[in-house]
Image (spheres, coloured by chain):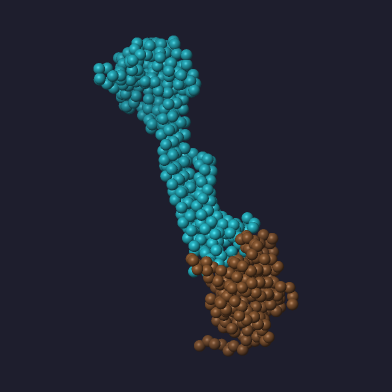
Amino acid sequence: MSEKILQIQDLKREFRMGTEVVRALKGLSFDVAAGEFVTIMGSSGSGKTTLLNILGCLDKPTDGAYLLDGVNVKDLNRDELARFRNVKIGFVFQSYNLLPRTSAIENVELPLLYNPAIGSKERRERAIHALEAVKLAERLDHTPSQLSGGQQQRVAIARALVNEPVMILADEATGNLDTRTSYEIMALMQELNQEQNKTIIFVTHEPDIAAFSSRTVMLRDGKLQTDTQNQAIKSAREALAALPESDDY
Amino acid sequence: MKVANLIRIALRALQRNKLRAFLTMLGIIIGVGAVITMMSIGEGSKQSIQSSLSSMGSNMITIQPQSNRTGGVRIASSEVQVLTLSDVRVLRRDATLLTAISPQASTNGQVIKGAMNWSTSLQGVSPEYFDIRKLTVREGIAFTEDDVRSAAKVCLLGQTVVENLFGSNEDPIGQIIRFNKIPFQVIGILAAKGQSSFGQDQDDVIIAPYTTVQKRVLAITHFQNIYASAVSEEASEAATDEIVRLLRENHRLRPEDEDDFRVRTQAELINTLSSTSSMMTVLLTAVAGISLVIGGIGIMNIMYVSVTERTREIGLRMSIGARGMDILMQFLIEAIMISVTGGLIGVFLGISASLLVAYTLGWPIVISQSSIVLSFLVCAFTGVFFGYYPAQKASRLDPIEALRYE
């Protein structure tokens, strides 16, 4: 195994709701190595979202350790967390979360604006490069309203890639898309994972999406239910080809 | 976080909502514009009052009779016959702080020259009057002490009188005019002085020796006024005290008696008028300032709406690495940009409006740098002050909740 990007040990997260204490995560442990494509699954209430927030450094665990790229997130303050999110994590959301009335390239440049190490020339170059990687090089100046859902999600993926994070964190990234477009996005994800060796953590509740990943972590009631290596990874590209040519009616 | 990036972020955010940014600016634009216009007009009228008063002679002191209470009856001051030649003599002899003294006996009447006639005022004065009032003789000569002694029937005409009595190619010098049937020879023409600050035409006047007016026209021995010049503007206060002391003595007033005359200095007049004008300026500027504050509240209002509306955007920015401080600065810079841009447009508008007022209404205006700097600073401060709370609210959002905000 290569180096470990994520190390989670006995992770707990409790919420105080009035007088009641809700235990969303009840001691979770697993590691993710560089280059893995992990799907995290679970029904609603399983602690999926809570785990995602912690993995994304948006929230801190109540107890236990979460090491991202060797750093214990628990020891970081608010500003350091923000810095960590900027350089270590690339978020992809279900609802894309692109800035409206803003061109694709400016949307992709956004994380770099918060990275003082990068000058304006490099910013533009890297944004163009990221958009090329998601095959949107011809649509640099299109605003989100001029793009389809799949294209918007690809812009969001480019935005996640642009700061060269150690992992991409996708939250139901295909949830708003039809099957064909979902498969296209998954094909892109697989390509990034296999060809560029990007570590991807993909939260979903759709089993057919999980089939494209290399490993599936199943949560249930805040605990790890199963953690299975996917022996036969489905190719999204092949699945796409297998779809009926036109499903219009 | 580089400031340049923050400015770039704020600028992009504003560009996404140009109309709203402009409408928000409007309050500031109008506020700053109004402040500058009001201050220009106020300052202009103040300076015009001051300059026209000092053109009358800033050292000038006027002594007028004052109706004192005699057995409960008050008499109009023009009817009071307390100022006499003896007062003038005493002042000439004993006053140390006065450089020139001239009595004045004046009357209104009809002046006739051939077929032309004109109603004007005849002022009988001494030659020193020209110094005191800063009058210059444009053509001809002024009368002398000899003319005063002999009560010569000579006069000098103001520009308005010349225009109304003589044709354009006629030379008034040496001609005879009749004032209330008494013939006067014109020996000079006064240089035009224009309107006084009270809107009086200072050129609508005939000036003659006071003896002539007293004896030949009015048949009186008293004066309506005595004019004097203090040695300097600063000395006019002390000169006033001196005049009061000398005249009370000369009028044999007992210590408990009221003055039967009144001494007024030009400086006093300037102060009164300037303070009236300053007060107007302050009032107008205060009203304009209120609109600036309202403009600021408009910014705050829109920034709050903007923060709420862009909650998801804030969540997204935080999730991709913006710190609370970055969000705070972004919204603060947006607010400052709105107010400063509005301020710049307002400065431009205020100057234009002031010039327009000067051009169309002919009002004197003075666009002072201080008004521009002041209103600009106020609006920049407004941006910071009213932008801070919404920006702080934005920076304290929880990214998780902000991302899920619908």
- Residue B190 lies, in percent from the top left, at 43, 24
State whether residue B389 appears in this view. yes
Q: Quadrant of residue A231?
A: bottom right
Where is residue A143 drawn, in percent x and y? 56, 69
Residue A187 quadrant: bottom right
Q: Which chain is brown?
A: A
- The N terminus of chain B lies in quadrant: bottom right
Image vertical order of residue A23 relative to residue B98, above or below? below
Decide if residue B326 is on the left or right side of residue B364: right
Relative image position of residue B60 (x, y in whole percent): 44, 22
Q: Is residue A143 visible?
A: no
Please say if B331 is above or below B363.
Answer: below
User: Which residue is found at the position 47% from the left and 16% from the top?
Assistant: B97
Chain B's colour is cyan
Residue drawn at the location 48% of the way across and 51% of the way down: B296
Q: Is residue A32 above or below residue B387?
A: below
- Identify the residue at image location x=46%, y=24%: B57
Q: Nearer the viewer, residue A82 or B72?
A: A82
Q: Residue furthest right?
A: A2
Count numbered badges in the picture: 0
Report the front residue among A3 and A141.
Answer: A3
Q: Locate residue B284, reporting x and y percent.
A: 42, 42
Residue sitting at x 37%, y 27%: B204
Residue nearest the observer in this picture, A173 or A31: A31
Q: Nearer the viewer, residue A120 or B306?
A: B306
